[in-house]
Image (tube, rainbow, N blue to C red):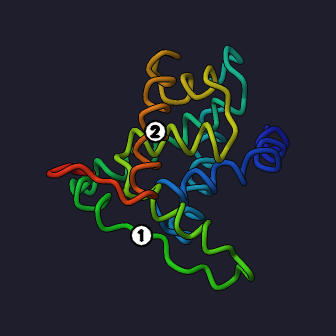
Amino acid sequence: MSESIRSLYDLYANDVYRFAKLTLGDAEEAKDVTQEVFYRAFRSMNRFRGESNPRTWIMSIARNYIFDLFRRRRIQQKAWAEYRLGQDTSVVDYPEEMHLLEDAILELKPTYRQVFVLRHVQNYSVQETATILHWSTSKVTTTDQRAIEKLRAILGGERSYGETK
């Protein structure tokens, strides 16, 4: 059983970390989330029925755990507005455009951010994203299109009057 989790960890830990970091905006917290996700996967391995891809199962655990974090804090809206990716000093020659994109992603509302990260950063298919988020594929497609439009507006500096994040 522990070998199964070890191989899942080797395959998907980077995906979980990247999703958590871009969703939460904090590298240290993303490391903690990654550990907790695989701990939870280990605890529930006997309940995994194999009805979904192991990758989507792990990412569903990550999504649910991140939402649990926000629910426990009871400050979700404030947290989304205040989180910002800091300069990661371990990354050398990180293009300025990537910093701008990360900041723009953090300005998206949570649903847009999740879909954008899963689809365009993690490269999940529409179906895999729908499974992870427990949504229909049409909702994923629509939300993805809206997220891209919003990112274009943010990066182009076009915000509507009274528009909220």
In the picture shown, does residue 115 fall above or below 87? Answer: above
Q: Which residue is mark 2?
A: 64
The answer to which image quadrant residue 35 occupies is bottom right
Considering the image in quadrants, where does the N terminus appear?
A: top right
Q: Which residue is mark 1?
A: 84
Q: Residue at x 23, y 49 (%)?
A: 160
Q: 47 or 75, which is in the foreground?
A: 75
Whether the residues at callouts 1 and 2 have beta carbons within 8 Å, the answer is: no
Q: Earlier in the sequence, mark 1 or mark 2?
A: 2
Provide the secondary structure element on which disc 2 rests: helix
Q: 105 or 149, which is in the foreground?
A: 149
Q: Residue at x 39, y 38 (%)?
A: 111
Q: Position of residue 52 (x, y in %)?
A: 67, 19
In the picture shown, does residue 150 fall above or below 34? Answer: above
Q: Position of residue 134 (x, y in %)?
A: 47, 23
Q: Position of residue 42 (x, y in %)?
A: 66, 41
In the picture shown, does residue 140 fall above or below 33? Answer: above
